[in-house]
Image (tube, grey):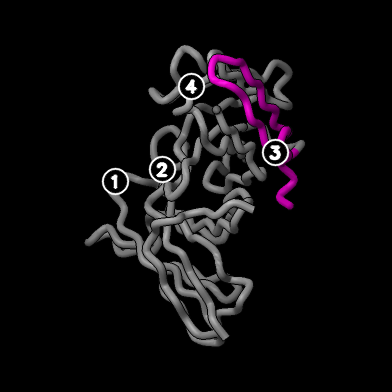
Amino acid sequence: DTGVSQDPRHKITKRGQNVTFRCDPISEHNRLYWYRQTLGQGPEFLTYFQNEAQLEKSRLLSDRFSAERPKGSFSTLEIQRTEQGDSAMYLCASSHGGRSNEQYFGPGTRLTVT
Amino acid sequence: GESVGLHLPTLSVQEGDNSIINCAYSNSASDYFIWYKQESGKGPQFIIDIRSNMDKRQGQRVTVLLNKTVKHLSLQIAATQPGDSAVYFCAEIYNTDKLIFGTGTRLQVFP
């Protein structure tokens, strides 16, 4: 257990529905990252926060995706109007700002869109 | 749990032998290179990293080698144990601190 928690661990939803995932980072970490992983592939970067500021978003993050970290602690990732192609593992990681080479990952949320 | 890396390159080793997992990276400007271990149904677990100005770093039972000339990274695991069975990913960081992951390798340890 790295100390990063994610909820839910599994989510099955129908196409067109909205889903929201939560990540609680290690408490003293000011950086929080979201990645997406499909079977057989390495994780792909989606976005990251330093405290409450969202500093970068990947082109993978379409306008149906939004992430927030309102108080600089936990973060949420929302997907609106889900599509089957959104089915993946959504991973959250956290790090100290000065040590982003040491990112600690949570267990992930497995999303299945039917 | 679910299976990670269904169609990945696989390295099979006997328990007690040493394992060497290789990775080619793309960006010569990367600052750090990192190895992660991922077990089925779990998130990636940090193993060891190496800064770009180094060529070798040792941890507990693991050694990472960096060859910048040919953009090659390797992870050596000494005395491989059944608990080492997992998918291993190399990753690099440059510029904005996001991890860029390479193709994973499945390590299978048999008795």
Locate the C terminus of chain B by quadrant: bottom right
Q: Position of residue A10 (x, y in %)?
A: 67, 37
Q: Residues within 10 Å of mark 3 (few under 14, many from 20)?
A: some
- Magenta stretch in the rendered image: A1-26
Which residue position holds label 1?
A: B27
The answer to whether any part of residue A52 appears in the image is no
Which residue position holds label 2?
A: B100
Q: Are marks 2 and 3 in contact (CB under 8 Å)?
A: no
Q: Secondary structure at mark 4?
A: loop
- Marks 2, 1: nearer the viewer: 2
Distance between the Cα atoms at labels 2 and 3? 24 Å
State left or right for residue B102 relative to residue A99.
Answer: left
At 45% from the left and 22% from the top, the residue drawn is A61
Which residue position holds label 3?
A: A9
Q: Residues within 10 Å of mark 1 (few under 14, many from 20)?
A: few
State left or right for residue A27 relative to residue A16.
Answer: right
Amino acid type, callout 2: Ile
Which residue position holds label 4?
A: A83
* Residue A105 belongs to the span the image colors magenta: no
Q: Please, is residue B39 above or below residue A91 in the view?
A: below
Q: Residues within 10 Å of mark 4 (few under 14, many from 20)?
A: some
- Marks 3, 1: nearer the viewer: 3
Q: Are marks 3 and 4 in contact (CB under 8 Å)?
A: no
Marking on residue B111: none
Q: Position of residue A11 (x, y in %)?
A: 66, 31
